[in-house]
Amino acid sequence: ADVDAKAARSRKHFKWTHPRHDVVDDDGRRFLRFVNARILSRDGSLSSPGGSLTVDLSTGTIVSVVLPPDDDEEEGDDAVGRETFRVRSVVDCQNQILSPGYIDIQLNGCYGVDFSNAGDVHVDKALTVKDVMDASARLARTGVTSFCPTVVSSSKETYRTIIPLIRRARMWQRENRMRWQQRQRQGKQRQRQSQRQYEVGANILGMHLEGPFFAPSKRGAHDERHIRSPVHGIETVKEVYGLSSDGSEEFDDDDDDHDVPREVIEPPKPEWQDVEIITLAPELEGAFSAIASLTQKRRQQPQDDDEEGEGETHPSPLNHPIVVSMGHTSATYQDGLTALSHGATLLTHLYNAMNPFHHRDPGLVGLLSPHVELLLKKEQQPLQKQQPRPHPTQPHPTRPRPQHHRHESKPLRPFYSLIADGIHVHPTAVSLAHRAHPAGCVLVTDAMSAMGLGDGIHSLGNMSVNIEGARATLANTDVLAGSVATMERCVKNFKEFAGCDAGEALLCGTLHPARVLGRDVARTRRRKEVVVVEPPVGVLEVGAAADLILVNDELDVLGTWVGGRLAYKNDEMIAKLRA
């Protein structure tokens, strides 16, 4: 009652509070509560005004979600949300939309940071850990709370430099967050200057390796010197990326007094656990074999994580699941079907760098058709008795299915990413794809280092890119070289192009990319001898990561929280709400 009264008094002033002012509960936990929100659900619906969500800052997770009852819904659906927490820190959302933060699974760089620059060409712009952390912090301004750093087709030396460097940034971010959470449990409000070295920023996920296994004719802005085929399957993939067997991503960093993370003098080798997504052309020699090897663990994992002893398992060369995406390809429709049957689950930037749709040869665009399900179901019927193979776009049999999902995901059809910047794909084509397969749509920026910098000449790996307005092209050509659009802009554009409501547009930037990565449910990973459970992202549910954004009906980002910590506040838009 005290909390509700306090929220009511602050409503006119759009009250924002900082986590350090929260009250410590008896067991040492601190809580932050969002009230008067319209909360986004898994089915894309928005709750009625008045929803509330509570975050445990000592874990960075959601502990309560209370939705106001709708006309057809009885009160009390969320029993956990009815728990009482000692909360005095409240954010009054003034009936704005509370959504999971955006997840960008294809980001080449931003704000002058190029994730592909190992210093072999632009020495003065070589990527550092600090660059990655700074980019992470600035991404929060656009509503991004998680992202996959993406490397374009590069030399072997570049992969061996960049992949371990990104890992170090990711691990430093994780350790810094764990220290902060520990201080919350201990009731300590202040942090040393060294621990505030980097602002709160978007989570650094595993990497997206876009190339170099591409069709030469569809390489786009990728350097032709690096394009090749995976002729020996997984062995070629290992050799090009320098990937070693799964080891530990931990590193010795016990010194709590350092001002900045130590740079690695002799960087460790890249490891499979550093990678989330690999984009390749499935028609290349050895590609189908590589896809099967890369995705085998992903197909087995739900089986491994649940009941022991059920079903057969087959040896896998990997201990870490990899998402294989089809892109920069001349693949036919049949090539796409074969790739799906081998485990591919995603299409990279649909329409771009692939054969166009034709009524006699639909190409990869044709994989969005429901007819694909019938074909692949027939093909897999003999295999289903021997080895069930859950697909990421199909809810796992042991997990509860959402009861009111407007666009229930279709098994077998792939996810597809779209660059909704208004340049890469015509609005009509955006609408057609969404109408054909709404549950598979994933919004990405495909942004390069010039995002947020304005017009001029910028770099993408070892290439120069010219920026004019919202258009990025290779210098002295008309070849598109990624985008300079933010996720905030892409989601806004998508809502307009697809003619959908705000909830549907938000799902394409939150839940759907989380499902591509298998992160919409808790994920168990092993590091050294310790089993770590990573909370779900892309959803607002009890136990999920408290990665949140507050947006208005126009989808302007008003605020961003990562693990419950305020990462960005849009003072200009908040002032308009106060008016």
Image (cartoon, helix red, strand yellow):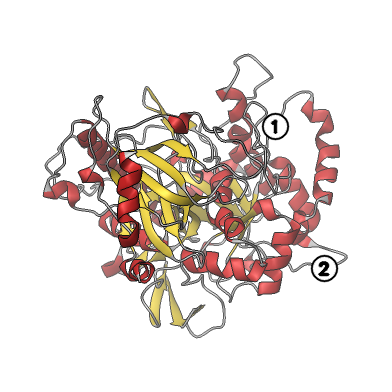
- At which x and y percent is residue 575? 33, 69
Q: Is residue 337 above or below residue 457?
A: above
Question: Which residue sits furthest top?
Answer: 309
Residue ID at (63%, 39%): 73
Q: Is mark 1 in CB contact (under 8 Å) with mark 2?
A: no
Whether residue 213 can be seen here = no
In this view, the residue in front, 558 or 174, is 558
Decide which of tag 1 and tag 2 comes sooner along the chain: 2
- At which x and y percent is residue 250? 32, 34
Residue hosting label 2:
358
- At which x and y percent is residue 390? 68, 33
Q: Is residue 14 above or below residue 77?
A: below
335 displayed left or right of 565: right
The image quarter containing residue 110 is: bottom left
Whether residue 41 can be seen here = yes
Q: Dot 1: within a 10 Å radius of its alpha carbon, few (fewer than 14), some, or many (20 or more) residues?
A: some
Residue hosting label 1:
389
Residue ID at (62%, 25%): 303
In this view, the residue in front, 1 or 183, is 1
The image quarter containing residue 188 is: top left
